[in-house]
Image (tube, coloured by chain):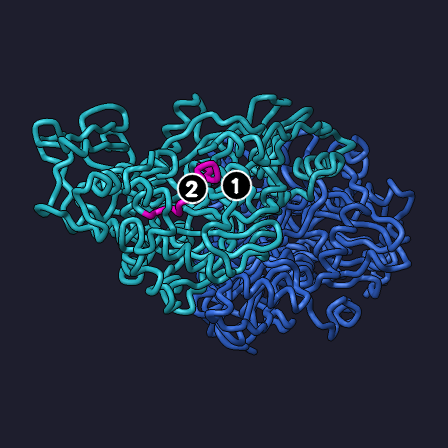
Chain colours: A cyan, B blue
Amino acid sequence: MNEKILTAAGPEAGQPTSPLVRKLSVELPPPSLDDHRGQRERLVEALDRSGEPAAVLSPSALKSLLGAAGWVTVLQDTTGRVLGVEPGASDAPAYGLAIDLGSTTAVVELCKLSGEVVGRAAGPNRQAQRGEDLLTRIQVAELEGTEGLRALALESLNPLIRGLAAEAGIAPTEIVAAAVAGNPTMIHLLLGLDPTPLSREPYAPMADAPDPWPAGVLGLELHPEAPVYFLPGIGAFVGGDVLGGLLASGLHRRAGVGVLVDVGTNGEIILGNRDWLVAGAGAAGPAFEGGAVKAGMRAEAGAIEALRINPITQAVNYRTIGGGVPRGICGSGLIDAVAELFLAGLVDRAGHFREGDSFQVVGPAEAAGGRAIVLDQEDLLTFIRTKAGMMAALDLVLGRVGLTASDIEVFYLAGAIANYLDLEQAIAIGLLPDLPRERFVNLGNGSLWGARLALLHQEARAELVELRTRIHYLELNVEGEFMNLFTPALFLPHTDLDRFPTIRDRLEGQGP
Amino acid sequence: MNEKILTAAGPEAGQPTSPLVRKLSVELPPPSLDDHRGQRERLVEALDRSGEPAAVLSPSALKSLLGAAGWVTVLQDTTGRVLGVEPGASDAPAYGLAIDLGSTTAVVELCKLSGEVVGRAAGPNRQAQRGEDLLTRIQVAELEGTEGLRALALESLNPLIRGLAAEAGIAPTEIVAAAVAGNPTMIHLLLGLDPTPLSREPYAPMADAPDPWPAGVLGLELHPEAPVYFLPGIGAFVGGDVLGGLLASGLHRRAGVGVLVDVGTNGEIILGNRDWLVAGAGAAGPAFEGGAVKAGMRAEAGAIEALRINPITQAVNYRTIGGGVPRGICGSGLIDAVAELFLAGLVDRAGHFREGDSFQVVGPAEAAGGRAIVLDQEDLLTFIRTKAGMMAALDLVLGRVGLTASDIEVFYLAGAIANYLDLEQAIAIGLLPDLPRERFVNLGNGSLWGARLALLHQEARAELVELRTRIHYLELNVEGEFMNLFTPALFLPHTDLDRFPTIRDRLEGQGP
């Protein structure tokens, strides 16, 4: 996979930023007996002279004007709202936050608004304690209201923010803007909006593109007046996380056909080029993020992220994140496990163990807490259903525009798993199509990347607005043809081996 | 006095309104599998189709969109902010509030946003318990912070609002906009802004024209998203209350020279015509509002609002507000008292009792609580200083533009006292100049009237913005010449009797 080409092609390279909030130095004439205009009026005029948008000040922003005279530093957002004023012409950096609020994992990234990334932190989305998948959380919200889940989202994000700020040696209130990417359910719950409409026909959200709102009102522990921008989504299943990834990929500006797949709980897909774009979502389930499988876990310290099975001895070699004692298997490790079991001949093409009904990945003596790490038949079939859903969704989207997988010139992989995933293994099990390997590009956390672009660049925010109108959304969940594509994909890698020539070769002993 | 001419000439007569918040009916296409745009996007588009300003929705406004489809009723403010949405095309009225937050008295008026006044309520400004005059309150804020005084302002206004809403049979949350007129200190304290700069050279406020802000943030018990608009002021001493009165008077659109005087604690003056306008403030003190004088009280039930003294028997005839047992004397009663004592010859032109050192207005048997209502020498001199300050300020403002009182073609009286004041008596003591009586116009509570105009009419709000730039503010407190005008005004009506020909005639037994 080629990660480098993207970073160079991305809209960030060396550009000056145009962030959600700007730090401006302006000079306020001091009040005198001949000029006793209000402090606010001095500031409004000074900003106006500098060509800034018409200033709007909250009561707390007004308070920060007490005694301000001479050169002052103003924080102003793109709508004109002034966050506050500090004495002196400061050249200290202003900070912003990119947030990827995933169903399973929350990631926050601290940036200087001049563009430099300062730090990154990730943690579980604590909402998962109320349900691993989106549908369960929507049901919880329907029964109990949104407040509990909203609080859990905040309890997931705020400690990460505090930690990042402490590491950078700044106060959280020095973070003056944020951009949040998340799927529509996550964004609804963070805003306290009822997510029920997202789970019911016709699957229309409360808002595709909520207006930015101050952090203090939302409950995020930043500067209380910091605008929090939400990356827009399309419909119930393609959220700002996916559009953020699309933005980061540049797929929408390419001449050739490309696809962007978020290999996560929701399995979103965007297919197209600079002329047309379609989107769909497979609702794959949490297996790729370590859910649903008994030995599964999030990609964090102690997770087996890669493994190999000796086809002769059946001995397992594995690598854990952080290198410590294994505690479970994360998504990339599960892909490896299923692929290795299949390629070693321990599991047949239907995903059934040829002997016994489970496989011990790590024995109790080696594993954390003395508990063996085991995959059983149910785990395998769960995981295979997940990968089949992903492939069927991709086939469905391709079919709707009259294309097949081989037409894909560039295949962007996004989602937490993308950083760790072994491409050969993913193709071996039929999670990804059997394309020339150089066509795959690991986008990493495209959602977070997109959030950072939106935080920092006006062009990115304008592009997101435009993308919303350009993308045609396909409602995959209501398509009967989905089952026709899903069933053959329940095989490893697929019933139709002609679609996986390199795997066929490998199974016949000629592959890599 | 002629109150009628004004009501007819005012900018309200029969006009359609353009209030701070409008109630609009728009049709939202229902979501479908072919159109699963967000609810927000449906609304934004519907408002856009109707030519409304670009909609902005808070999280709570978004919540009100749950399930909205077909015809809905939208509340939207002039900046585009949507307060909320209700199902159905409602023709129920929307309500707004005009607020006059005076130093001594708070008055609120409930209106339909179509223009009809529904009710009015008044009560004390509870901040007075922390200091009758502005300077004392500013000192309290400096020592203790603004929060206590802010809370007292809210405790003064919110019960009035609840009461008015109850009388009208509506919930306070059905009030969707408010316009507040007050002097700069009142507005600073209501916003929680430090008022200290108002009391110190160069007397520059924190804000002349604070931006509108949602009621919920400010602590006013209306619709929490209701925009609260503040009538702008000029400098530390001419506030939105005075500009509101000016707006209501129409003085700024007249060809001839007029003056507007707010006969209240702060004694603000605006002089001019459609070509030029100057303003100043006399800081008269609380005597006109029943403060500073021991028997003084607010103009409320039990206050002696008018009285006559028989020059032969010295018997007192009086009228109380509400007609009940007298509890004290309000401003208009005090003017009468001083005038009658003077005209009856009981007090000399310097304000000293010719015999004894006090006058019993009501004996203990007749007065509330069995406590006689008495004016002593100190009370008289306090009151005379107040009227002298008012007149000196007016003389000073006139002198600065090379005019004298006789050049005033129309004299607008504003302030709580204006409704009750006896013009002859006010002239007799030299509070008002001795002009032909038909030149006086009682504006009533001009501040409240101006607030109502700002609540209801875009033209009024635009005019206020323009007035701020048109008015030249004169800093009277720093003028040495003030004392030269104040000292002769300490006489009744003035040392220079030529300026009060009708009073001289009357003293010589030829007057009315």
Residue A304 occupies which quadrant of the picture? top left
Where disc 2 sits, the SS reads strand
- Residue A135 is tagged as none
Mark 1 vs 2, N-terminal side: 1
Q: Which residue is mark 2?
A: A414
For the residue pair A195 and B325, the one nearer the viewer reads as A195
Q: Is residue B16 left or right of residue A422?
A: right
Residue at position x 45%, y 24% in the image? A170
Chain ID of residue with mark 1: A
**Residue B232 position in % (x across, y down):** 68, 49
For the residue pair B264 and B486, the one nearer the viewer reads as B264
Whether residue B218 is visible to the viewer of this picture, yes or no, is no
For the residue pair A264 and B436, the one nearer the viewer reads as A264
Assign the N terminus of chain B to one quadrant of the image: bottom right
Q: Which residues are the magenta region? A: A430-443
Residue B254 higher or lower than A310, as above or below: below
Chain ID of residue with mark 2: A
Circle 2 Cα neighbour tier, 10 Å, few/some/many (<14 / 14–19 / ≥20): many
For the residue pair B437 and A273, the one nearer the viewer reads as A273
Amino acid type at image mark 1: Ser
Assign the C terminus of chain B to one quadrant of the image: bottom right
Q: Which residue is mark 1?
A: A249
**Residue A509 position in % (x across, y down):** 28, 38
Residue at position x 61%, y 71% in the image? B117
CA–CA distance in space, label 1 to label 2: 9 Å
Q: Is residue B422 left or right of residue B330?
A: right
Residue at position x 33%, y 37% in the image? A511
Asked if disc 1 and disc 2 are in contact, CB closer than 8 Å, the reply is yes
Where disc 1 sits, the SS reads helix
Circle 1 Cα neighbour tier, 10 Å, few/some/many (<14 / 14–19 / ≥20): many
Q: Is residue B112 left or right of residue A199?
A: right
Please tell me whether residue A431 belongs to the stretch shown in magenta: yes
